[in-house]
Image (cartoon, rainbow, N blue to C red):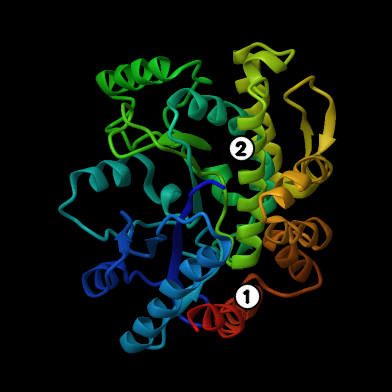
Amino acid sequence: MLLKGFEIEMYTGTPDGEIVGLSDKITTSLDGYVREPDSRNVEYITVPSRNYDQLLCAILRPRLKLREYLQQLGNYTLIPGSTLSLGGSDRFVRSDPTNPYHTYIEQTYGAKVVTASVHINIGIDDPELLMRACRLIRVEAPLFLALSASSPFLDGKATGFHSTRWRVFPQTPAHVPLFTSHADHIQWVEQQLAAGTMQNVRHLWVSVRPNGDHRPYDLNRLELRICDLVTDPISLLAITALLEARLLQLIENPHLDPLTLSTFSPEELISLTANNEIAAATSSLDAQLLHWQDGRKITARDWIAELYQEVWSLAKQNGFSCFLSPLQKILREGNEAQQWLQLYAVGFSAQSTIIQAIRAVREREVELEDKLCASLAA
């Protein structure tokens, strides 16, 4: 099994859904939290682990610690969703006014980047294998967006998208190729830095990217960046299990590569994938997508179900099929955005939907902590 870890961004605010910027206080007072350019969301990073049980508690415990701290500051809580659901997208609330990179982000992108999400990191040390993994997951990233969509609202209204976050988020640079090799990736990044289309090595905002401690030279993991915030840890682990199983399949089968398995050229693949991302951001699991291998039409839900069947035995063989199986529930009942839109359709306001979600997330965390993490600690 592969090493796995998460970067999880969440909004802070009041129990009635108003998002309030507190990250400057949080990062000063608590270890393990990272400041984002806008103070209304805060990020925590889990320690990499191969073990799904440990990952579950690594997701939960920092959140419970953060909730305790927020209570000390006042009547504050954590707010689900990946956009400024109930208001505030007309302004930028700086967390660190002295940071020049934050100044660039505010001036260039404004509140489009003030989103919350989860980045899933999977360890792959071999740079050429990592590039192949990035190629495969890049063309399948719309499926992970479809599973995770949780941003149907912006400023109190339904936007018409299941992932408003991915629809508005500025993908930078505007054109990112499917890298043919590690050397190709290095050369491309150096060119972008020289041209100023990337401000630094972190300024590569695309659905999936190779990552490491000395980018682009020393790389050790794949980072999937397309997912909206998945608040339920069991759902997040199911999505991660699909990603890991797909990567294990790729490791077993070197021919599983869009550059050789697809009837499309690399440029056509980039275009097809961009259209699939827009479709997934719009309709998530119900989106009509074009398959990267041959262009056949398939819904995101059916494509995910196909992959699930394909990788199930591999997950079972490696002892994590029980973490993959909750994916079936997401396919059956819908992702968070779809569940919220069902409430919205029968007359719930965006605010009452978010308030209900805030409570449900808190109750779920307590339930999982009591049932699972307490027994692991014992």
Q: Quadrant of residue 331?
A: bottom right
Q: Quadrant of residue 24?
A: bottom left
Residue located at (38% from left, 77% from top): 66
Is 199 left or right of 9, judged from the image as shown? left
> Viewed as shown, does residue 143 lie left or right of 55?
right
Q: CA distance from mark 1 to mark 2?
A: 32 Å
Q: What crowding class fits label 2: few (fewer than 14 Cα within 10 Å), some (14-19), or many (20 or more)?
A: many
Q: Name the kind of residue labelled 1 in the image.
A: Ala
Does the image show residue 160? no
Depth-wise, is mark 1 or mark 2 nearer the camera?
A: 2
- For residue 100, say whether it is visible: yes
Identify the residue position indicated by label 2 in the image. Answer: 247
Query: Do residues under tags 1 and 2 come within 8 Å of each other at their CB atoms?
Result: no
Left or right? Give the position of 116 relative to 264.
left
In the depicted structure, whether residue 12 falls above or below residue 152: below
Q: In the image, is residue 179 above or below residue 344? A: above
